[in-house]
Amino acid sequence: MAKTEIKNKIRRLRFDNDEMTQQALATGVGVTRQTIIAIEAGKYAPSLALAFRIARFFRTQVEDVFEYGDPTGPSQDDQAGQ
Amino acid sequence: MAKTEIKNKIRRLRFDNDEMTQQALATGVGVTRQTIIAIEAGKYAPSLALAFRIARFFRTQVEDVFEYGDPTGPSQDDQAGQ
DNA sequence: CGTACATGTAAAGCTAGCTTGACTTCGCGT
DNA sequence: ACGCGAAGTCAAGCTAGCTTTACATGTACG
């Protein structure tokens, strides 16, 4: 099992939002600091609920904070635009 | 503990997409049928990775498939009429 | 120098998410 | 009536996500 196919822009967003600390973000979304550290480090992906809370915290969409690198390459063809 | 703060439109999307069966969706996103049943029933929320796969499978955004009912209340003013 | 804050690492424990497998019920075609 | 595919339920087991606690490092400030 690789780390995770999910990447995130949390660290980037924290700095873009007034240099917010990990502790502040953790408290803001209701988890512990270790959870934020682990997620930022890509050790594991957050739950859907936490992903939503983080996205809302930064006033963005889940898709703007997390990126999913598709390993299976399902039945979807590419789309133009966006 | 309530069931989950997360609601989804999977059942709706399945029917909108050629009356696809739970088994077909399950296979398509790489999980078992029981997992789809449980998620549709709101017994628990999927992982972020699975949420992404489901959203892609239906060619939508995560936010279009799942809805998060915030239990803690957003720390910022969040209101976008919808 | 000391101490306060931000970040990171490690380890042990609990629970939610997912799996396998077996069995039930409903609707439809033969 | 019988079989079949779709949906659902129950139960036991494994693992990923999260918690708590504790300790290490770097940087800034009195």
Image: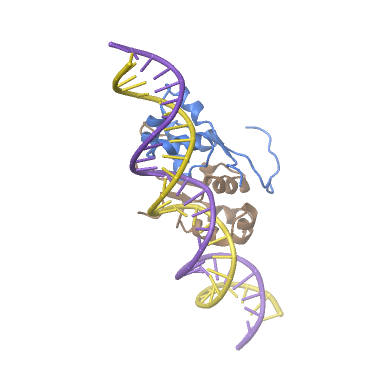
Chain colours: A blue, B brown, C yellow, D purple
Q: Nearer the viewer, residue C7 or B59?
A: C7
* Image spot of residue B73 (x, y percent): 34, 39
Question: Is any part of residue B82 visible from this angle?
Answer: no
Image position of A39 (left or right of B23)? left
x 58%, y 49%: residue: B54
* Image spot of residue C20 (x, y percent): 59, 65
* Image spot of residue D27 (x, y percent): 43, 17
Q: Quadrant of the C terminus of chain A?
A: top right
Q: Nearer the viewer, residue A5 or B58?
A: A5
Q: Nearer the viewer, residue A67 or A41?
A: A41
| In the image, residue D29 above or below residue A21 | above
Q: Quarter of the image holding residue A33?
A: top left
| In the image, residue A70 above or below residue B37 | above
x 49%, y 59%: residue: B38
Question: Is any part of residue A72 visible from this angle?
Answer: yes
x 37%, y 39%: residue: A30
Q: Quarter of the image holding residue A81?
A: top right
User: How many labels sit on residues?
Assistant: 0
Image position of B2 (left or right of A6)? left
| In the image, residue B28 above or below residue B71 | below
x 60%, y 47%: residue: B53
* Image spot of residue A52 (x, y percent): 46, 40
